[in-house]
Amino acid sequence: MSLIVMKFGGSSVGDAERMKRVAGRIVERQREGHQCVVVVSAMGDTTDDLIDLTKQISSSTPPAREMDMLLSTGEQVSVALLSITIQSMGQPAISYTGWQAGMYTEPVHGKARISDIQPERIFKALEQGNVVIVAGFQGMTQEGEITTLGRGGSDTTAVALAAAIKADVCEIFTDVDGIYSTDPRVVKCARKLPEITYDEMLELANLGAAVLHPRAVEYAKNYNVPLVVRSSFNHNEGTQVKEEAAMEQGIVVRGIASDKNVARISILGVEDKPGQLAKVFTALAKEQIDVDIIVQSGVLNGVADFSFTVALSDKDKAVKVIENIRSTVNFHEVTSQENLVKVSIVGAGMVSTPGVAAKMFEVISDLGLSINMVSTSEIKTSCVIDNSRLPEVIQALHTAYGLDTEQQAFVGGPSDRR
């Protein structure tokens, strides 16, 4: 007997028929002799529908607390319906909200982080022979306030719960067979990866791959949670995410990710004196605005320009924050740019293979596109470019690095700083 955490996303439980299919899969696993804890997202587009409803009611930004109260109801519907479905199949089951399951978070609405998990109630229900179904995406502060974990938070719930109860494996069920070299809906010949390292998956998740939430991968890495990504619509082998993964012969780049949720903020004519950047980024951090790529120009006549990227949804807020610190930071103007995309290549083999970044720049240049910003680490290179020809760029990179199915792999080229 093993203890398994199974997580099902919104598309997997999007309607009654899919709910029955998921229930059947859970009952099958339970009757094989395993103990099952199931984490479920809101059905289909429920969360988006609830957000749209608030826009019909009010044109102003709704209070974050009330949004958490509202959005947490989507998962509550899912867990109750799934429990009812499983019980109708003759298998005992019980559903819990995040707070009933002992999920405690920091006191931040909309993007809370898990601070503690007290799973005693879950263990008791398992001992009684129940399938335990927990609402993902939500928790409660020590003061009793309902919070949500942000987009993709159900992945985080599942992995954190698996770590807390010392599950033998955490299975993430989604609408694809596993983790692919890139989005198979964009590149038809994308290859499914049998396994991938935590570090590679964390980079891909942070860079726009939507299969797993970055915080979920962080939890898996930090607590060494065995993680498998597989389809909820078939029984095919999925992708294992683990500390070390066998490298395919000659494969240097393991995956290509893209993120359209990016905007570029430029602050022009910043006075060149110590502490200016610290003031800017401290002000942004206080408003919970994450900053990604940062580029500063050379100093000319005592001033410099610098640019950075933020989530597109944070663009207007970031500009407002910077305008509000004019009294402490001297600059000429702040501008913003949309219609951009961050395209990234990721692979543990990049650090020891020359020519990887050069190949990426060459491919983008050959398509007639300019590179606005570049960011690198040991296992990734990212370029911010115009988003108008994204599918072409991804396909060209996928081919250039030998990732197309049955294609010979890229083996490196002239040395560069990668």
Image (spheres, rainbow, N blue to C red):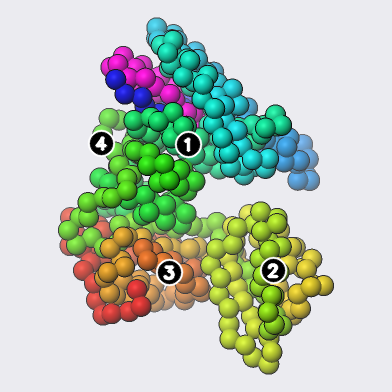
Q: Is residue 71 left or right of residue 219?
A: right
Whether residue 272 appears in magenta in the rendering, the answer is no
Cα distance between the residues tagged 3 and 1: 29 Å
Q: Are marks 3 and 1 in contact (CB under 8 Å)?
A: no
Q: Are marks 1 and 2 in contact (CB under 8 Å)?
A: no
Return the disc, 4 or 2, that comes first in the chain's sequence: 4
Dot 3: within a 10 Å radius of its alpha carbon, few (fewer than 14), some, or many (20 or more) residues? some
The residue most toward the bottom is 301
Q: Amino acid at mark 1?
A: Ala
The residue most toward the right is 327
Q: Which callout, 4 or 2, points to the residue nearer the camera? A: 2
Query: Compared with residue 384, is residue 313 higher up or lower down, i.e. above or below?
Result: above
Which percent across, then down, holds residue 17? 43, 21
Q: Which callout, 1 or 4, points to the residue nearer the camera? A: 1
Q: Amino acid at mark 4?
A: Glu
Cα distance between the residues tagged 1 and 4: 23 Å
Location of the N terminus by quadrant is top left
Cα distance between the residues tagged 1 and 2: 33 Å
- Residue labelled with disc 4: 237
Cα distance between the residues tagged 3 and 4: 32 Å
Q: Are marks 1 and 4 in contact (CB under 8 Å)?
A: no
Q: Which mark is residue 160?
A: 1
Return the disc, 3 or 1, that comes first in the chain's sequence: 1
Return the disc, 1 or 4, that comes first in the chain's sequence: 1
Q: Is residue 279 visible?
A: yes
- Residue labelled with disc 2: 280
Identify the element where label 2 is drawn: helix
Return the disc, 3 or 2, that comes first in the chain's sequence: 2
Identify the element where label 1 is drawn: helix
Whether residue 30 appears in magenta in the rendering, the answer is yes
- Residue labelled with disc 3: 376
Give the residues drawn in magenta, as a range.
19-42
